[in-house]
Image (cartoon, helix red, strand yellow):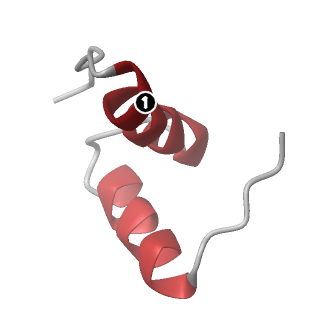
Amino acid sequence: MNVWVPQLIGAAIDRAVGSGRFKTRQEAINHALETTFVGKEPNTVT
């Protein structure tokens, strides 16, 4: 699935990946979707 996000959100995702919070953009997007729709907090790299 391809996901198009507004520039502001894309920049926030890039910052989270750049800071090491997530390994990839896909991981960051999956985290956001799981948190919103599944209601659980998946494991993240800290």
Give the quadrant of residue 11. Answer: bottom left
Q: Residues within 10 Å of mark 1 (few under 14, many from 20)?
A: few
Q: Is residue 34 above or below residue 16?
A: above
Q: How many marks?
A: 1
Q: Secondary structure at mark 1?
A: helix
Looking at the rendered structure, the kind of residue marked 1 is: Phe
Residue 6, position as x, y percentages in the image? 57, 80
Residue 45, position as x, y percentages in the image? 25, 25
* Residue behind mark 1: 37
Furthest residue in direction right, as rendered? 1
- The residue lying toward the viewer, choosing from 45 and 12, is 12
Q: Quadrant of the C terminus?
A: top left
| Residue 46 located left or right of residue 38 | left
Q: Name the residue rendered at 23%, 20% in the picture.
A: 41
Q: Is residue 5 above or below residue 21?
A: below
Residue 3, position as x, y percentages in the image? 73, 55
| Residue 11 located left or right of residue 19 | right
Q: Is residue 44 above or below residue 1?
A: above
| Residue 15 located left or right of residue 28 | left
Give the quadrant of residue 9. Answer: bottom left
| Residue 7 located left or right of residue 41 | right
Q: Name the residue rendered at 29%, 44% in the picture.
A: 20
Q: Name the residue rendered at 84%, 39% in the picture.
A: 1
Q: Name the residue rendered at 72%, 66% in the picture.
A: 4
